[in-house]
Image (cartoon, grey):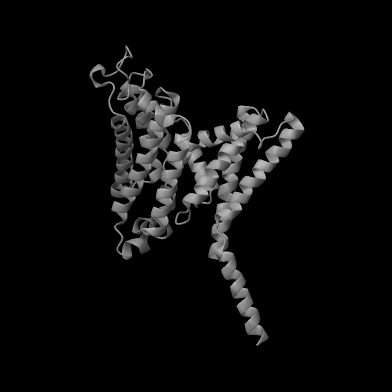
Amino acid sequence: MSTNSAAQAQAAAQKSARRLPPELNIFLVLIGIALVYEVLGWIFVGQSFLMNTQRLTIIILQVAVIGIIAVGVTQVIITGGIDLSSGSVVGMTAMFSASLAQASTWPRALYPSLTDLPVIVPLAVGIGVGLLAGIINGQLIARTKIPPFIATLGMMVSARGMSKWYTKGQPVSGLTEQFTFIGTGIWPVVIFLVVAVIFHIALRYTRYGKFTYAIGANVQAARVSGINVESHLVKVYAIAGALAGLAGVVTAARAQTAQAGMGVMYELDAIAATVIGGTSLAGGVGRITGTVIGTVILGVMTSGFTFLRVDAYYQEIVKGVIIVAAVVVDVYRQKKRKT
């Protein structure tokens, strides 16, 4: 009788532990990092890191664009893939959307007959160009069976070249107030959170999400169960491309100009935020909520380094170490899950 009671108590404890959200540990890491910066701030700088509302606002605004990209990258990685093209797609879509958002008062408009257009036009063009890039990625991966790393690497180089060719390397300026409004104030954060909520619901409660996790967990089992793997992969990469396009529009609106060099290394920051947020590079595991927290962690780290006046070179070194550490933890977690 006592043995049964002990077994029941153990089962209840395990069930209670399973109810705890997996993002809790990631959130505790975020709190820990912020507290470390707070202590180091008083020791080395003589200021508070957390009590500066302006600094916290800047952190949130800085991570919004990376967060939008990371939402798409999360879905790609859950399928067991990778997307290295998102940063270049940001630069390309920024150029295309900005070229259709110029005001008639700007003397060097790229298309003088297409100035003062409604804001929906450059917004749709930016998202559409990103969507097309994502579809090309998905088709290459699904139809030709080449590794996602190679397909998206090719798109990364091509998209960056396209953004330079489009205006022969010249920046695009003189944007309308309606367009730049997208990047002002808290709007980038609102866009990021809306995107995160939409795809959190899509991954958890829709057939799209079930198919995405199934493909990442076991692609052969997914195919046997009736899932059109190739078609679904195209959808996932198309969504990632569209979100990179949206991020490009927000980037151009925030900067009030567009340059071919925009978005450099954004893809690595998005992957880092996704991995730090608990998404497994092996596929089949990950949540948008974890990615949101991982994105904030990345922003807090960057802001904290700047706050402590740490040289930019050291920042990159530490960021790389943290990414590798997150992958090591993920590998350990996968082994533990299997055993």
Q: Is residue 73 visible?
A: no
In the rendered view, does 331 fall on the left or right side of 243? right
Question: Residue 121 in the image: x percent, y percent?
Answer: 28, 31
Instruction: Using the image as rendered, state which of residue 227 and residue 179 is in the foreground.
Output: 179
Q: Where is residue 251, by image quadrant?
A: top left
Q: Locate the C terminus by quadrant.
A: bottom right
Q: Where is residue 304, by image quadrant?
A: top right
Instruction: Using the image as rendered, state which of residue 159 and residue 36 is in the foreground.
Output: 36
In the rendered view, does 82 fall on the left or right side of 135? right
Q: Locate the N terminus by quadrant.
A: bottom right
Instruction: Using the image as rendered, state which of residue 169 and residue 243 is in the foreground.
Output: 243
- Residue drawn at point x = 72 percent, y = 36 percent: 40
Question: Residue 70 in the image: x percent, y percent?
Answer: 46, 42
* Number of marks in the rendered image: 0
Question: Residue 337 in the image: x percent, y percent?
Answer: 54, 63
Q: Is residue 52 visible?
A: yes
Residue that protrudes farthest toward the left in the picture: 113
Judge whether 76 appears above or below 191 on screen.
below
In the rendered view, does 109 fall on the left or right side of 326? left
Residue that protrudes farthest toward the bottom in the picture: 1
- Residue drawn at point x = 69 percent, y = 42 percent: 35
Judge whether 226 appears above or below 175 on screen.
below
Question: Residue 19 in the image: x percent, y percent?
Answer: 55, 64
- Residue drawn at point x = 63 percent, y = 29 percent: 306
Residue that protrudes farthest toward the top in the picture: 107
Q: Where is residue 262, by image quadrant?
A: top left
